[in-house]
Image (cartoon, grey):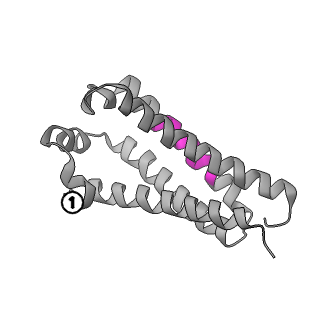
Amino acid sequence: MRRWHFYVMGAIALVYGLLAMAEYVFVAYGMRTGWMALYSDAQIAWLGSIPGWVHGVWGAHVTLALVGALCLLAHLRPAVWMLAFSFLTLVVLYVWMLVVAEPSVIAMAGGGTSAWLALGGVLLLSFLIYLYARQEKQVGEVL
C-alpha cells in the first residue's frame, strides 16, 4: 500500500502541470478563453510581446512540469530531474519578468501584495513539488 500523501502530491503536481500548460497554450495561440478572458488588453499585449527565447524557456518549464508530474505518478525516477529543471526554468522566467521585462509583471498586474503573493506561491509550489519527488527518490519506496 502506497502512502496516501504520494497520491495527494501527485494530484497537486498534475493539476499544476496541466494549468501551466493550458495557460502557455492559451498565450502561444492567442486564445482568450477560460481565465484569459479576464486579462486586460494591456496584459494580453504584454504577453504577446514576450521574446522568443522567453517563450522557449516557458515552454520548457510547462512541459517539464507536466511530464515530471506524470512521471511522479508513474513511479519513474526521471521525475526528480524533470521537476528540478522545471523549477530552475521558472526561476529564469521570474528573473526576466521582474528584472528585465519593461514593464515588469508586477506593474502589469497592478502592483500590490497580491501579485507578489501569487508569484511567490507559484515558485514555492514548484519548489515543494520538486523537494517531494527528491525525498521520495531518497526513501526509495515509490521512486
Locate residue 113 relative to residue 103 in the image: left or right: right
**How far across and down, in percent of the image, does residue 43 sit?**
21, 40
Q: Secondary structure at mark 1?
A: loop
Query: Is residue 131 found inside the magenta-colored segment of the image?
Result: no
Q: Is residue 65 placed above or below 42 in the rendered structure?
A: below
| Outermost residue toward the front in this view | 4
View extreme (bottom): residue: 1
Q: Write down the residue under mark 1.
A: 31
Q: Which image quadrant for residue 44? A: top left
Q: Is residue 88 magenta?
A: yes
Residue at point 80%, 57% (across, down): 137
Q: Main secondary structure of the magenta part?
A: helix
Q: Give how far across and how far down residue 35 sits, in percent.
A: 26, 55
Q: Quadrant of the N terminus?
A: bottom right
| Residue 136 higher or lower than 41, as above or below | below
How many numbered discs, if any? 1
Type of amino acid at the residue the image marks with label 1: Met
For the C terminus, the image quarter is bottom right
Give the x, y percent position of residue 63.
Answer: 49, 59
Q: Is residue 42 above or below residue 7?
A: above
Mark 1 Cα-neighbour bin, 10 Å: few <14, some 14–19, many ≥20: few
Q: Is residue 53 left or right of residue 17?
A: left
Which residue corresponds to the image point at 45% horizontal and 63% vertical from the top-left? 18
**Residue 98 x %, y %:** 39, 27
Question: What's the residue at 52%, 62% (across, down)?
Answer: 66
Magenta stretch bounds? 83-93
Of 47 and 142, nearer the camera is 142
Q: Which residue is drawn at the image coordinates 44% and 33% (left, top)? A: 117
Relative to residue 31, is residue 74 drawn left or right? right
